[in-house]
Image (spheres, rainbow, N blue to C red):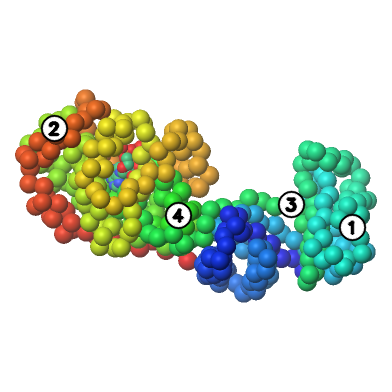
Amino acid sequence: MKEIILCKYGEMALKGLNRGWFENLLLKDIRSRLSNIGKFTIKNSQCTIYIEGEKIDEAFEELKTVFGLATLSRAAVVEKDIDVIKRTAAEYLPQFLDGIKTFRAEAKRSDKKFPLTSPQIAAEIGGAVLGVMPQLKVNLDNADVTVRAEIREQAAYIHAGQVKAAGGMPYASNGKGLVLLSGGIDSPVAAYMMARRGVVIEALHFESFPYTSERAREKVMELAGLLAVYCGKVKVHVLSVTKIQEELRKFCDEEYFTLLLRRFMMRLAQRTAQLYECNALITGESIGQVASQTMNAIEVTDAVVSIPVFRPCIGMDKDEIVHLARNIGTYETSILPYEDCCTVFTPRHPKTRPELEKVLEQEKLIDIETLENESFDGLFTKELRKF
Ligand code: ATP
Ligand code: MG
């Protein structure tokens, strides 16, 4: 019996004339990942991708991280003969039904020449399963597992349901964004959310050596490596803000400190984005989470850049962000206790309702252009690659 992986697309299936373009990007992503695992044949037909090859277990795990795929199933492929279908259901499906109590059977017949109707096929495979697993009960409304037979043009496919894949849109189908990547929980989640919508991710990290350590930088590289599981490769740019922070501390009002630093970050990020042809900035901010993320503070921070700034976590609660961070595998790294440049020299009473005029007055006290140029001259880039 031959086993294959059936991948179904999500939203992409709704695309009109552009669908072929999206499909090609998706197939390219799948091919490049699977080529690192072994030899596979990949076929695409009617919003389903059929993958055949030796290392099916490894391929299945890898495919869970492909953006653009909605569901995955492992399926047995057999000839379109009801006796063979029944026999295969009895042999193949029990491994997926271990330990469960209830199941139901469904069938889909795209090949209308097949002599049995869908309900008849479902009854046959359900019966075959019960024949070898008589302890199971059928439950049509709320089954633990749904087993299926799909009778398609080429063959019949038998499987025990689908697992959810990463969803979203194929990687690299929607421009390039520069994520401001701290070592925290939120910004890797923000990067993931945008990457899942097809945006190519590059990262920019600000450090403040010696106030922040080598380990803090390594942690950020590790986070970028975890994002590369989904994105293939992630370029990380690093800029130092040590001198900027020291000047701010010397010449500016403490309560404006964080805000002034954030405006520096945004200006430097915009320059980096322009240099590396990124169309937008991405941050992990969530409204109201901390003093620098009030409506006023965000307004003042944004006033300094002209490219779009995307904040996909903006409406999320912290526990929702944490939940997603755990699911995508970045949480454990994010909570490692290394300092971030935002946590050195933090004001005791940061401004939560800053006025732009006052901020501009503060900025007159330092030489913005020189500080910015000095930081930018030290730009350092590293690429983290998974496939
Ligand atoms: P995170 O969990 O992502 O660190 P946070 O809740 O700690 O976010 P802030 O420290 O206020 O919030 O940072 C808000 C956003 O600014 C971050 O999500 C990130 O996009 C960006 N940012 C903060 N510090 C840095 C840094 N050192 N380098 C790059 N970007 C940063
Ligand atoms: Mg942070």
Query: Dot 4 lies on which element?
Result: helix
- What residue sits right under mark 1 in the picture? 117
Out of 38 and 198, give the one closest to the viewer.
198
- What residue sits right under mark 2 in the picture? 358
- What residue sits right under mark 4 in the picture? 195
Question: Which residue is most to the top?
Answer: 349
Q: Earlier in the sequence, mark 3 or mark 2?
A: 3
> For the point 39% across and 57% down, which residue is it?
201
Image location (x, y in percent) of residue 293: 31, 34
Q: Label 1: few (<14), some or many (≥20) within 10 Å?
A: few
Query: Dot 1 lies on which element?
Result: loop
Q: Label 3: few (<14), some or many (≥20) within 10 Å?
A: some
- What residue sits right under mark 3 in the picture? 161
Q: Earlier in the sequence, mark 1 or mark 4?
A: 1
Image location (x, y in percent) of residue 27: 56, 68
Type of amino acid at the residue the image marks with label 4: Ala
Type of amino acid at the residue the image marks with label 3: Gly
Query: Dot 3 lies on which element?
Result: loop
Viewer can see residue 58: no
Type of amino acid at the residue the image marks with label 1: Thr
Q: Is residue 176 left or right of residue 247?
A: right
Give the CA separation, mark 1 to mark 3: 20 Å
Give the CA separation, mark 1 to mark 2: 74 Å
Q: Earlier in the sequence, mark 1 or mark 3?
A: 1
Q: Earlier in the sequence, mark 4 or mark 2?
A: 4
Image location (x, y in percent) of residue 281: 32, 51
Tag 1 and tag 3, C-beta contact below 8 Å: no
Give the CA separation, mark 1 to mark 4: 42 Å
